[in-house]
Image (tube, rainbow, N blue to C red):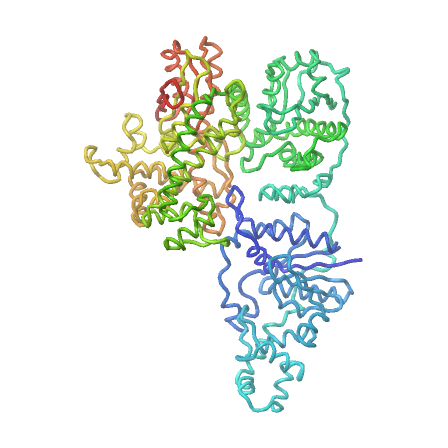
Amino acid sequence: MEKLVLIDGNSLSFRAFFALPLLTNKAGVYTNAIYGFTMILDKIIKEENPTHFMVAFDAGKTTFRNNLYSEYKGGREKTPDELRSQLPYIRQLVESYHIKHYELENYEADDIIGTLSKQADEQNLKTIIITGDRDLTQLASDNVTIYYTKKGVTDIDHYTPEFIAEKYDGLVPNQIIDMKGLMGDKSDNIPGVPGIGEKTAIKLLKQFETVEGVYDNIDELKKSKMKDKLIENEADAKMSKVLATIDRESPIEVSIDDLKLNEFDDADKIKLFKTLEFKQLLDQMDASNEGTDDRVIEYQDNLDGFDFENTKEASIHFETNEINYLKADVLGFAIHSQDKVYVITLDEFKENKALHAWLENEQVKFSAYDVKKTIILCNRMGIQIKGVAFDTMLASYILDASKTIDDVYSVVSEFGIFYVPNDESIYGKGKKLHVPERSILFEAIAKKVTAIAETKEKMIALLKEKEQLALHDDLELPLATVLAEMETIGITVDKSTLVEMQENLKVRLDKLIEQIHNHAGSEFNINSPKQLGVILFEDLKLPIIKKTKTGYSTAVDVLEQLRNEHPIIEDILVYRQLSKLQSTYIEGLQKMITPEGKIHTRFNQTLAQTGRLSSVDPNLQNIPIRLEEGRKIRKAFKPSKEDHVIFAADYSQIELRVLADITGDEHMKEAFTANEDIHTKTAMRVFNVNKDEVTSNMRRQAKAVNFGIVYGISDYGLSQSLSITRKEAKKFIGDYLDSFPKVKEYMDTIVQDAKQKGYVETLLHRRRYTPDITNRNFNLRSFAERTAMNTPIQGSAADIIKLAMVQFREKMKNKDFKARLLLQVHDELIFEVPNDEIESFKPFVEEIMNHALELSVPLSVESSYGETWYDAK
C-alpha cells in the first residue's frame, strides 16, 4: 500500500533540539537536534514503511501572512544559535536518506504540507503528517493523520477526525481554524478575541459552526462581556481565522510523484554520521546494510603456492582480539597480492619460515592498516619487517584529521568501499563480545586486506593532489617505526617508589578528610556531589551558584567562586586534586607495570587534529606536574640500568618561534635571533618601557598573551588567566597586536584564506579543515577562526618534533650510541643514556632538534639529565 509521509522540518527541529541536551562532536558542531531528527526519521521509516516522503521547511521569517498582519509570529524568541547552526546539517541529513526536502519563498512549511496533503487526499493516498505544531491538525481527514509530538520526539498523539471530535467536543478538523480565529494563538501571535478561550470557542462553534456563523448570528447571544468583546474584535477574529488557515493551493513546484522513495545505499548517511560522530547510530546499523556492496571475497586459507621469491608488493593485515596490540592475541594473518587473498592462523604464521624471510626482505613493499601495530606484532614473533611502504590509516588521518578512525571499515568506507564489516559487527560488544567461528572471521580478515589494497592508489592520488605525499612518506610512516621501537622498549618504573608515595598521600588525604568533616560539623561522603551540596548550601548556607537536575552543582568552577566564602572550599579543592592523583596515577600506574618492571604506553598517531601525538594505556603525557605531588610521580621513572641516566631534551618556546617565522614579524624575529627573553621583549613593547623597567607582573602578563595568541585566546580567556576585567584584557590584546603588526596581519590573512579555501595548513602541508569558518553561528564561527589562527602554529610545532624523532633514528644508524628514545611528551623527548655517553650525546641530540626544520629564527633546545625523570627537569 502506498503511503506518504510529510514532515514539518522546522517544527521537528525545534522539538528535537529542546528534547535532548546540547551535544557536540569534537569539531565543536552542535548535534543534538540533528540526532533527535535522525531518531524520528528512523522510527517513521521503520514503523510506517512509507513509499513517498518529504520534509518541508520554512523559507524565511516573513510570509504572505505578515502582509496581512505585520505582528504575525512577532512574539517568538530568536532561534538559538545552537539550533540555527544545525539546520543546514538537518537538510543534509534528509538528503542522506534520499528524502526530498522543499521550501517556498513567502510561504510556510505548513502551506507546502497542506497543498501536498490535499493532492494526496484527492488521490486516496494514505498520508501521515509529523509536526510539533497543532496548526496542522486542521488537515486531518479519513486519509490524513497528523502525528503531533507532544513532548520530546517520541510522545505522540495521532490526530484523526475521530480524535479531534473527542478532544474538542465534536468539532471537525476544519473547525480548528475557526477555533483559532476566536481564541487566537499566542505562539504565532494571532490575536483572536480577548477573553475567549478554548472552551468558549468550542461552545460557540458547536452552536454556529464557523467564525462567520458567530457574527451572522451575533444578535442571538445574550448581552454579556463576551458578546461585547466579540463585537469589538470582529475584524481581528476574521483576520485571525485567515492567519490560522493553511493555504492548500500554494504554488509549489513539486508533485506527489516527485516524492517517491527509491532504493538507496547508506553511503551518504554513514559518511554524515561519522562526521557528526553518531557512533551509537552507526553501531545500530546492520553491518550487512552499511552499503550496497555485499561482495564475496574469495580467499585461500593457506599459503600453498604463494610465490615468495617473486612477489615484491603486497598488502598485509594482522587481526587481533583487542585494540592493545602490545598484548593482544593474533587471530589471523592475511596477504593480498595480484588479486589473490590468503588468510592463515597464528600457528601457521609461526611455522612458515619462508613467510618470515619474505616479511624481512626490504625489497618487498608492503601496505597495511596501522603500520606501527604491524611492526610490533612482527617484532613479538621475532620478525624485523623492513619494507612497509604505505599505511591506509595514516593516509586517512593526513587527508582529513577530523574524521574518526576506529577500524579498517571507518577508513575505507570514506572511499566508497562498503563490503568491509566494522569490528563491532564481527565481535559484538560488552557481554556479547566474542571471537566468531573461523569461516566468519577469515572472511572478515580477507575483506579487510582486500580493502587495504583497493584504497591505496586512491589515497596516493589524493595525497599527491594535496601535496601531502611527503607528509606520509617522509614523516608519518617513518615515525610509526620510531614509535614502534619506543613502545616495544617501554620505560622502567620503580613500583616501590609509587607504593611509598601512595602511603604518604593516604596520610595526607586522611588528614584532609578529617579537616573537611570538622569544617562541616559532621561526617559525609566527600566524593558524593549530592551529600557535598547539602553540606555546603544547606548546612553551611554558602551562596548557591548553580543548580542541576539532581541538586546543587559542586563543580570546580562553582567551588572556585566560593573559595573565599569558607575554608572548607580550599580543602575540598586540594582533596579532589590529590584524590585523583592517587587513584588515576599513583595507584593506576602500578597496575600497568609489567613483570619486567616496565610500562609500555601506546602512542596514538591519528587522534589530534593539530598533528600532535597522544599517549594511552597509560597516558604518560598527562601526568599532572603543576602540583609538586604530581611532579614527584616522575621519580618512579628510572633508567633500566644502573650506569644510565634519564636525559630530557625540550624545545624552548617552539610555538612562539614558529609564530615569528610564519608571521615574519621583525620584532619577534629580532628577539629570538638575539637570544633575548621574548616575554620581557613583549612587555617592553606593550607597556612601552625599558628593559630594566619591566616588572615580574608585566612579564607574566606578556607571557600570558604571547601563549594566548598561539592558542587563539579571547579577551574573556585572558581576563580569567590574569584575573583582570574583560575590558582590560581586550585592551591588552589590542596593544599587543599594535606592537606586533605582522602578527595581526597574519591573523586577519589566515582567517580570510580559510574562508576561501576551507582549510589551513602547517609548514609541511598538514591540513585542518574549517567548515564553520563562514557559519552564521557566532560561537561556531569564532571557534573556527581561532582554529584557523592557531593550527598552522601548533601543527608546525608538532611536525618539527616528529621530524626530529625521525632524523634521530636515521642518524643513530651511523653512531655507536647505546642511548635509546623512550618517550615523547609534548615538546620534549625523553631518552635513556649511558653515563659515559652524556657529554657526546647532548650536542648530538640538540643539533638534530635545532635543525629538524630550518626556520627564519633559530630553534632552541634545553636539555638536562638525572637519575630519574624528575631529576632530569
Q: Residue at x 43, y 37 (%)?
A: 579
What is the x, y in percent for residue 612?
A: 48, 31
Q: Tell how many labels.
A: 0
Pick whichever, 278 or 579, lies toward us.
579
Q: Residue furthest front?
A: 522
90 relative to 600, above or below: below
Q: Residue at x 45, y 9 (%)?
A: 815
Q: Quadrant of the N terminus?
A: bottom right
321 relative to 724, above or below: above
Horizontal side of 580 relative to 1 (left or right) equals left
Is residue 614 visible from the viewing direction of this image?
no
Name the image quarter holding residue 580.
top left
Horizontal side of 728 relative to 213 (left or right) equals left
Pick whichever, 455 or 335, lies toward us.
335
Is residue 1 visible from the viewing direction of this image?
yes
What is the x, y in percent for residue 514?
A: 38, 41
Q: Quadrant of the C terminus?
A: top left
What is the x, y in percent for residue 496?
A: 45, 22
Horizontal side of 92 relative to 825 (left or right) equals right
Name the image quarter holding residue 408.
top right
Name the image quarter holding residue 512.
top left
Q: Residue at x 41, y 28 (%)?
A: 501
What is the x, y in percent for residue 238?
A: 59, 79
